[in-house]
Image: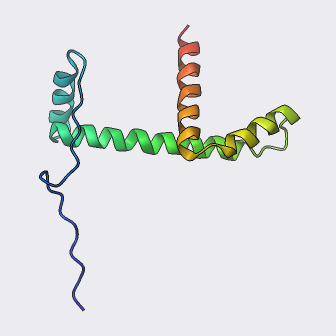
Amino acid sequence: MRPMKQAVYSSRTADKFVVRLPDGMRERIAEVARTHHRSMNSEIIARLEQSMIQEASLADDLASRLDSPELTLNERELVQCFRQLTRRQQNALVALIAHDMEMAAGE
């Protein structure tokens, strides 16, 4: 039995997506990529993956806290509504709440 070949990443077959960066961001990404000994593309991919992992982790953490027996009836209804959302909608809502909390803390 032969070992399975692992898929090789090829820039020719990879999905491509053009991103417009604000002034100065390209230079900042290039600088950070150099410090991490990566290409700009690899740096962007690594950071996107990390943010998506963190977002999913936040949603999981929030979902586990939503099972608290100390919740009021209104809070339980909100939990039920939250659980009816798709995972993508849950993540977006959690990200929005986290952003609002950061903004409020900065005031």
Task: Judge by depth and name the residue closer to the eye, 34 or 48.
Answer: 48
In the displayed orientation, state which residue is furthest to the top.
107
Q: Residue at x 56, y 46 (%)?
A: 87
In this rendering, position of residue 98 left or right of residue 3 = right
Above or below, 98 against 104 in this view is below
The number of callouts visible is 0
Which is more toward the observer, 69 or 1?
1
Q: Quadrant of residue 104?
A: top right
Residue 36's place in the image compared with 23, above or below, is: below
Q: 3 left or right of 57?
A: left
Where residue 21 sits, quadrant-wise, is top left
Q: Farthest right residue?
A: 73
Question: Residue 50, percent across and down?
Answer: 38, 42
Q: Position of residue 25 (x, y in %)?
A: 23, 21
Residue at 59%, 46% in the rendered image:
60
Q: Residue at x 21, y 87 (%)?
A: 2
Q: Position of residue 7 (x, y in %)?
A: 22, 66
Quadrant where the image shows the C terminus? top right
Q: Quadrant of the N terminus?
A: bottom left
Most extreme residue toward the bottom, as rendered?
Answer: 1
Q: Position of residue 47 (x, y in %)?
A: 32, 38
